[in-house]
Image: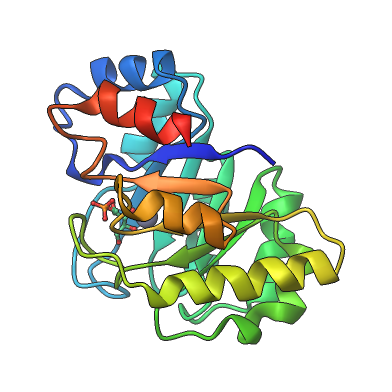
């Protein structure tokens, strides 16, 4: 599998986002990562369905929606209508197996996300229901945090188990990805790189080109 790039718009300037998305598409980004935060599951509030709907109407880039909300099953139909890849947290209080199946039934690719405190072994039996697993390499909630190297072992363990089960599951890494950490994540088995502050900087195109070169 080739490496996919999924820039996170969390630290973007939302008034100029349409132009930035065009630039990211032209630079060859594969998806756009959208962080939905409810102020309960994480100590921050970002945006919800209306903003994602506007982005979807203005762009063809696949939308990779990362729900950081409590009991996500309550809102899954609303988000599925505006997502291509739809992920939620294993720790968020929904029945993960049921929700992964529902996401697929609603026509989206399913993604299960784990926080730094969750061991990869806890989700082994859910892997056949996942199109992607997202390993958080920071505590979810904010952009611009430092990469936690413990995520690398988790990626390696998950890659080994995905191969052992003979599955085709993307492995996404999110948090603190930059020129130093991206190569380490790929080496450990990541196939999708989320990058927020590294991409939404004054070197957007240059930094995307670097990630694409890996
Ligand atoms: C954090 C979000 C991330 C965030 C990453 O909870 O899930 O997607 O935007 O930002 P950086 O790349 O700056 O760590
Ligand atoms: Zn995210």
Q: Nearer the viewer, residue 169 or 180?
A: 180
Answer with left or right where residue 74 lies relative to residue 13: right
Question: Residue at coordinates 18% horizontally, 31% vertically from top-left?
Answer: 14
Q: Nearer the viewer, residue 29 or 82?
A: 29
Residue 15 in view of the camera: yes
Q: Looking at the picture, does residue 32 appear above or below residue 24? A: below
* Quadrant housing the N terminus: top right
Q: Quadrant of ligand 1?
A: bottom left
Q: Quadrant of residue 165?
A: bottom right
Position of residue 121 measured from the top left corner of the image (x, y, whole percent): 64, 85
Answer with left or right where residue 121 lies relative to residue 104: left
Q: Nearer the viewer, residue 180 or 147?
A: 180
Question: Residue at coordinates 19% horizontally, 72% vertically from top-left?
Answer: 43
Q: Looking at the picture, does residue 114 appear above or below residue 133? A: below
Position of residue 90 measured from the top left corner of the image (x, y, whole percent): 53, 76
Question: Residue at coordinates 18% horizontally, 55% vertically from top-left?
Answer: 144
Q: Quadrant of residue 132?
A: bottom right
Q: Looking at the picture, does residue 146 appear above or below residue 131? A: below
Position of residue 191 measured from the top left corner of the image (x, y, whole percent): 58, 48
Residue 115 in view of the camera: no
Answer with left or right where residue 151 lies relative to residue 54: right
Answer with left or right where residue 199 lies relative to residue 69: left
């Amino acid at each position: 599998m080739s490496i996919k790039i999924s820039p996170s718009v969390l630290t973007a300037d939302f008034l100029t986002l349409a132009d930035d998305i065009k630039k990211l598409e032209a630079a060859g980004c594969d998806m756009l990562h959208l962080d939905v935060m409810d102020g309960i599951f994480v100590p921050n509030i970002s945006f919800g369905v209306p903003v994602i709907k506007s982005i979807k109407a203005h762009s063809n880039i696949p939308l990779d929606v990362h729900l950081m909300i409590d009991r996500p099953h309550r809102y899954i139909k609303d988000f599925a209508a505006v997502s291509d890849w739809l992920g939620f947290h294993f720790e968020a209080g929904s029945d993960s197996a049921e929700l992964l199946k529902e996401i697929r039934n609603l026509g989206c690719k399913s993604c299960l996300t784990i926080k730094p405190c969750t061991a990869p072994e806890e989700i082994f039996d859910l892997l056949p229901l996942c199109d992607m697993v997202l390993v958080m390499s920071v505590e979810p909630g904010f952009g611009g945090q430092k990469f936690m190297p413990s995520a690398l072992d988790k990626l390696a363990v998950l890659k080994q188990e995905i191969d052992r089960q003979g599955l085709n599951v993307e492995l996404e890494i999110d948090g603190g990805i930059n020129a130093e950490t991206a190569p380490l994540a790929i080496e450990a088995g990541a196939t999708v790189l989320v990058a927020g502050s590294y991409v939404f900087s004054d070197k957007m195109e240059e930094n995307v080109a670097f990630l694409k070169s890996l």
